[in-house]
Amino acid sequence: MGCYSRLRRIRRMDPRQDHELIFRWITQYEFPRDYLHGTSVAFLRDYGVPRVSRLLDRTQEFERAGQKRYDDTVLLAYELVREGMDSEHGRAAARHLNRIHGRYRIPEEDFLYVLATTVVGPKRWIDRYGWRRLSRQETESLALVGRRMGEMMGLSGVPDTYAAFERLHDAYEREMFAYDPANRRVAAATLRVMASWYPAPLRRVASRIVLAVLDEPLLEALGFPAEPRWFRAVVHRAFRVRAALIRLLPGRPEWLPRRPSARTYPFGWTLDDLGPHWAHSRAPGPLGDETPPRPAPGPSPAPPSTARTSRASRQEPR
């Protein structure tokens, strides 16, 4: 299969009908590693918002189990679309995601921003460092999957186009990015997780490479200094060379999708493995497009007895 064969098929598809299939092709065939890189940068963008990072800092999940927290986030997104978002499995994954978030009082605008980072972050990374830019159909498919996810979470005002997601993303950052010590603590814990994927002698360089691809407003909000200009140029050139080499390779065949692998679960995982241990003791609620279950019928409360009524009437002042 030629490297552009799948793109030619995508350009003949309608994202409104085929966005889940196109999304799977993006994440499992065309840009599997670049999509994960964009998602990883999206994690770091969330920490530029003190209200978000303070909550994460308070839970200490990245300090105690950062690799599991990272893996669970990636795997839950995979499980949502694995069999289709409206399949029973996809809806079960969405209920589990809502059950995890339901413990915390999170403003809806924060949910919308974090959702927007999962749409805008991978798009911007792929356009900058991928072996080709995303097509219009692929871009809108990212947005439509994000929209459906927001609907299942019960969010209101979820954008329905990529342009709308991008406007929400950028406006929120202009208003909410600010330095806070919690930002740096959570970001440093996440960088330690990312660096741990490499041999010990390379971990410091790996962390610097991540910082080299971050923009100035985000670095300021996280409290990290910018890497030297020459180092950023080297990193940028290295990613562009990588993209050029990938462009020379044949397309990934249909029988060989790249599915996520998780260091936390070397022998595989189930939905019950994902998320904090306490989440499984919470009953899952209905999705945003479901009617809440009615309470089970029970005996009607008994009317007050005559004796109690008579006693009450005797105690009333005259």
Image: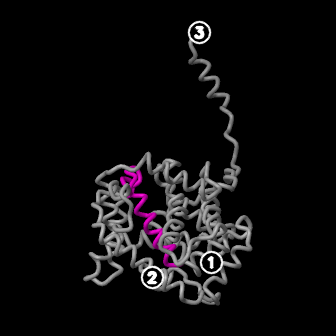
Dividing the picture into quadrants, the one containing residue 210 is bottom left
Q: Looking at the image, is 174 positioned above or below residue 194?
A: above
Residue 33 falls inside the magenta stretch = yes
Provide the residue designation for mark 1: 25
Q: Quick one: label 2 or label 3, which is nearer the N terminus? A: 2
* Distance of label 1 from label 3 (alpha carbons): 81 Å
User: What span is in magenta?
Assistant: 32-56
Model colouring: one colour
The residue drawn where x is 55% and y is 63% is 119
Residue 7 falls inside the magenta stretch = no
Quarter of the C terminus within the rendering: top right
Q: Is residue 120 visible?
A: yes
Question: Which amino acid type is shown beneath numbered disc 2?
Answer: Arg
The residue drawn where x is 51% and y is 48% is 109
Q: Residues within 10 Å of mark 3 (few under 14, many from 20)?
A: few
Query: Does the magenta stretch mainly form a helix, a strand or a loop?
Result: helix
Q: Residues within 10 Å of mark 2 (few under 14, many from 20)?
A: some
Query: In x, y percent, where is residue 62?
Result: 36, 66
Q: Pick whichever, 167 or 58, lies toward us.
A: 167
Circle 3: element type: loop
CB under 8 Å between discs 1 and 3: no
Q: Quick one: label 1 or label 3, which is nearer the N terminus? A: 1
CB under 8 Å between discs 1 and 2: no
Instruction: Specify the farthest residue to the left.
Output: 201
Query: In x, y percent, where is residue 264?
Result: 42, 78
